[in-house]
Amino acid sequence: MKSFKSYNLFTFFSLYIAQSIPMSFFATALPVLMRQGEYSLTAIALLKLIKLPWIVKFLWSPLVDSKTETVKDYKRWIFGAEIVYAAIIFVVATLHIETDFTLVIILIILAFISSATQDIATDAMAARSFERKDSSLLNSIQSMGTFTGSMVGGGFLLMLFKEIGWGSLLPWVAIFVLIALIPLWKNRFLKLRERHNKQKAKPKDMLLFFAQKNIWRHVVFLVLFYAGLIGILSSLSPFLVDLGYGMKEIGAMVGIFGVSTGIMSAFLTGIFIRKIGKPAARKIVSALVLLPASYFLWLQLSGSTNHLFILLGIGLLWGIYGMTSTVINTSAMDIVRDGREGTDFTLQIVLTHLSAMVIAIGCARLGDVLGYAVLFSVELAIAVISFIFVIGFKPFKVKNDDVLLDE
């Protein structure tokens, strides 16, 4: 039984890597290329709009929920979405980013629609494949898979891109997306918890999620919890470019060192949550969110460009980001209604993506006009507000299958 659970966790780990690697590569390489081309921080932040499918994926999440009942149904959605994802990446590989920039962006958006669909089905299947007591372990694996994909896509591939170029690199990315499906294809151990709500999910279920009594507390928590990190994360690569670092160095510092720190902290946070419980974990991690903004503000005000200090800041930022991601995913997966797993989890994660986009663009604008010191100061203020809210936060409780999920 234990070996079955381990293989199931590895299956989901592979799926989260598959969706994350291409997205991380595009999200990391394009800002560096744009900054080197002297684009403004605001223009670079607007590039986050390529992730718009991940913001609006809640629109078709009820469709996925309504068409999935068995493991075979979920596999059909996941395999179909990933094959389209890989096919589009193959097409992008044949284009030249310098001359076909607009077409490349359009195709990347279409690719992200496919990966967002895979994510809906994967999250819903994950929510039904594990007992509630295992949610922190599952969500640490989810965060680790996403961060591992970020490390490969935003680290190793960014470094390879400098050496072999766009057209030679992307076909291998597409092939890996398909290879990552093998564990799911071979998995015969997945068992889904039976749904007691036999009604099919409908679009109105998105509104009904927000109609639940006192859900606003949970919504504010999702919006605020890692808001004090997002502006720094989105401006980190341009900040390093302005300090004189090149693409290869940034790939190693952020994509490999930083993200590997996030992977390790995500794993440890899953264990940490199981030991002390979710309410205590939220308070402790929200206090730690104060550290990165404080540290980067000190770096900027002191004028320090010491390489060791920069690396320490990157490790601190990504390590705490890994912790917050696991806490958010665990909290979100507990607040799902029976038969609406994909819809509810997607809605909650979309809230975090949407708020992150707004914060990233706003902070980038502040950085453009008033400088990095103001950007870091605003992020510190947001982190303080988040900490105060979480300290007084009364967790939202959902009664599902006669079990209070947030006890």
Image (tube, rainbow, N blue to C red):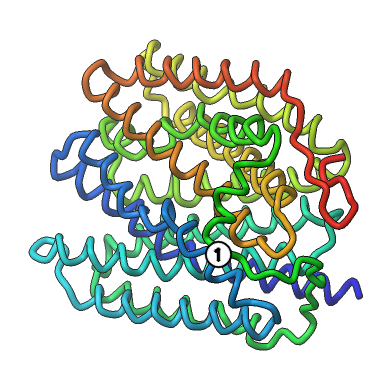
| Image quadrant assignment for residue 355 | top left
Q: Quadrant of the C terminus?
A: top right
User: Does 5 sit above or below residue 139?
Assistant: below
| Image quadrant assignment for residue 83 | bottom left
**Residue 52: percent from the left, percent from the top?**
36, 53
Could you say which is closer to the camera, residue 105 or residue 209? Answer: 209
Q: Residue at x 27, y 76 (%)?
A: 168
Mark 1: which amino acid?
Pro
Residue at the far top in the pictured view:
301
Residue behind mark 1? 62
Left or right of residue 246, residue 319 in this image: right
**Residue 319: percent from the left, percent from the top?**
60, 38
Query: Visible in this render: residue 372?
Result: yes
Could you say which is closer to the camera, residue 324 or residue 164? Answer: 324
| Image quadrant assignment for residue 188 | bottom right
**Residue 282: percent from the left, percent from the top?**
73, 31
Residue at the far left in the pictured view:
99
Q: Circle 1 sits in a helix, a strand or a loop, which is it?
A: helix
Q: Residue at x 25, y 79 (%)?
A: 91
Q: Residue at x 77, y 78 (%)?
A: 190
